[in-house]
Amino acid sequence: MTTFHAVVWLDHSEAHVLMFDREHVEAQRVKSRSHHKHQGKTVDDVAFYATIAEALAGTREVLLTGPGLARTNFRDWCNSHQKAIAGVIVDSIAADHPTDAQLVALARQYFKKFDNLAADPSVA
């Protein structure tokens, strides 16, 4: 499914990748195989981040959500290893543990505001 928007909720153990358009939502869960949480990057983290990035291929705007540093770590990894994905990440916001439906609702509201601001030349 080719979509314009995606929202990713992630922590150090899993990611929920939700790509959506006006009528459809496609969800994918990615589990980390790392058993060494919060102790630096591991080979498993690289595989985890690569799988998330692969799921986002073709999406034009991505909102990262989740608790803690996982969002920042993923964004930094993308800046170094997946520049195309890094270029479509528009923001990173904290979110505890919402349901997938709550995530999509949050992202739709965010992107509506984001798209309106991007279209307004007086906002700089």
Image (tube, grey):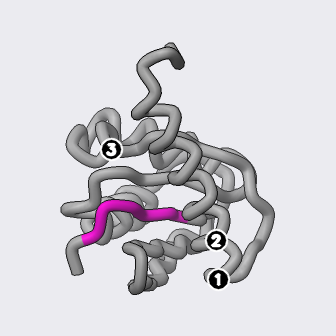
51 over 122 or under it: above or below: below
Q: Residue at x 48, y 83 (%)?
A: 29
Q: Which residues are magenta?
A: 3-8
SS class, disc 2:
helix
Q: Position of residue 84 (x, y in %)?
A: 21, 43
Dot 2 surroundings within 10 Å: few (below 14), some, or many (20 or more)? few
Image check: 99 left or right of 64?
A: right
The numbered disc on residue 88 is 3
Q: Position of residue 121 (x, y in %)?
A: 42, 19
Question: Going by the picture, which residue comes out furthest to the right?
Answer: 96
Three-letter code for the amino acid on which mark 2 is drawn: Ala
Dot 3 surroundings within 10 Å: few (below 14), some, or many (20 or more)? some
Image check: 73 left or right of 101?
A: left
State the image quarter where residue 72 is shown.
Answer: top right
SS class, disc 3:
loop
Is residue 102 visible in the rendered image? The answer is yes
State the image quarter where residue 77 is shown.
Answer: top left
Q: Which residue corresponds to mark 1?
A: 101
* Separation (CA) of disc 1 from disc 2: 6 Å
71 over 58 or under it: above or below: above
The numbered disc on residue 5 is none
Image check: 36 left or right of 48?
A: right
- In the picture, which quadrant includes the N terminus? bottom left
How many numbered marks have been drawn onto this rendered protein structure? 3
SS class, disc 1:
helix
Q: Are marks 1 and 2 in contact (CB under 8 Å)?
A: yes
Q: Which residue corresponds to mark 2?
A: 105
Three-letter code for the amino acid on which mark 3 is drawn: Val
Please tell me which of labels 3 and 2 falls first in the chain: 3
The stretch drawn in magenta includes residue 6: yes
Please tell me which of labels 3 and 1 falls first in the chain: 3
Q: Position of residue 122 (x, y in %)?
A: 50, 15
